[in-house]
Amino acid sequence: LAFCGIPKVGITQWIQFLRFTFGAKDYQASPYSKPDQRLLRFDLMREEVQKEILNDPEWKFAVFMRDPAERLLSTYLDKVRVNSGNGGMEAIHFRNVYNFTESPTFEEFVETIAKNKTHCPVRGGSKRENLHGADWCTDPHWRPQTMACGISEFLPRINYVGSLNHIESQTRTILQGELWERYGKYFHWNTKKEGKNKEPECASSPPQLRVGDSLYGFQQHPLDSGENIGKTRQSQVAKSKSIGAHHHATGSQSKVDEYYTPRLRRLVKETYRRDYQLWELIRDEKDVVSGSDLALKISGECRDAASQLAKA
């Protein structure tokens, strides 16, 4: 299985899961500073290995997508806005990189991204112009999802395209068979410790299983299903299912109406129009969709649009 990890679309959880399959005892920790996570990166593999994986039909490719407006807001809340909730460190970093004298408002953030880029800045530059546009040069946290992992070029090669709205059931479909039976069903989270005894993410210890503990499995959660759950929790279930149980803790879906004006929605829809083209085809699908089916639908829409223009 080759998984396309897109920032702000559950990539952290998937890296943690893949480290779990390696036998990493600290798989619950933040994975980005772990030396073994480099073994998972396609871009660090030798060119001949990359070609072998791409051309071997035994390798299955998978990707999850997220509502572009929700993803952008999640990025802002998690990476850009400085507040006590996100600790401020990453937000301060992003603020310095892009020359903001203070945390921009969400409206300022969206408007800056939506500006047309005049050129592709040198990587590592510290100009706010790096924010402009939504293209290949854009920071990966708000780069269009269709520009990740070659989706725009190799969509038919992707076997499973899922929606973060249905991540719990679609994850089981993607991991069907041996991957689920050997690893997915045994993935376990500790209940987070509170207060001064809470472990830092970078030093998270293995979960302690006790007799009677329930193993929900990777991307599974008791709130993901309305079955066998008391009526007093049904409202929680509905809320959880609408955003996916494993989204970042920013709770961005519940804040969409708070932050978005009709004008900002239009701006984001235009800026991320290619993402929306795919998202609108999969957002309500309970089952994963093959990239080849999506490519046929998109090419059909293009032919219809061209035909309408020719008649005009």
Image (cartoon, rainbow, N blue to C red):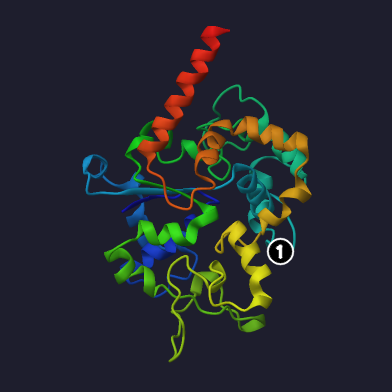
Looking at the picture, which amino acid does disc 1 mark?
A: Gly
Where is residue 17, by image quadrant? Answer: bottom left
Q: Nearer the viewer, residue 239 or 207?
A: 239
Q: Is residue 117 above or below residue 218?
A: above
Quarter of the rendering occupied by the N terminus: bottom left
In the image, what residue occupies the spot 61% across and 34% down?
130
Residue 132 is at least partly visible in this image? no
Residue 29 in percent (x, y) is at 48, 69
Residue 224 in percent (x, y) is at 54, 67
Quarter of the rendering occupied by the C terminus: top right
Which residue carries the number 1 mark?
85
Q: Determine whether, in the image, residue 48 is placed left or right of residue 120.
A: left
Q: Determine whether, in the image, residue 53 is placed left or right of residue 261.
A: left
Q: Secondary structure at mark 1?
A: loop
Residue 60 in percent (x, y) is at 30, 49
Residue 111 is at least partly visible in this image? yes
Where is residue 125, by image quadrant? Answer: top right
Q: Is residue 199 above or below residue 129?
A: below
In the image, what residue occupies the spot 52% across and 19% down?
305
Graded by Cα atoms within 10 Å as few (under 14), some (14 to 19) or many (20 or more), the crowding at tag 1 reads few
In the image, what residue occupies the spot 37% across and 62% down?
18
Residue 142 in percent (x, y) is at 58, 42
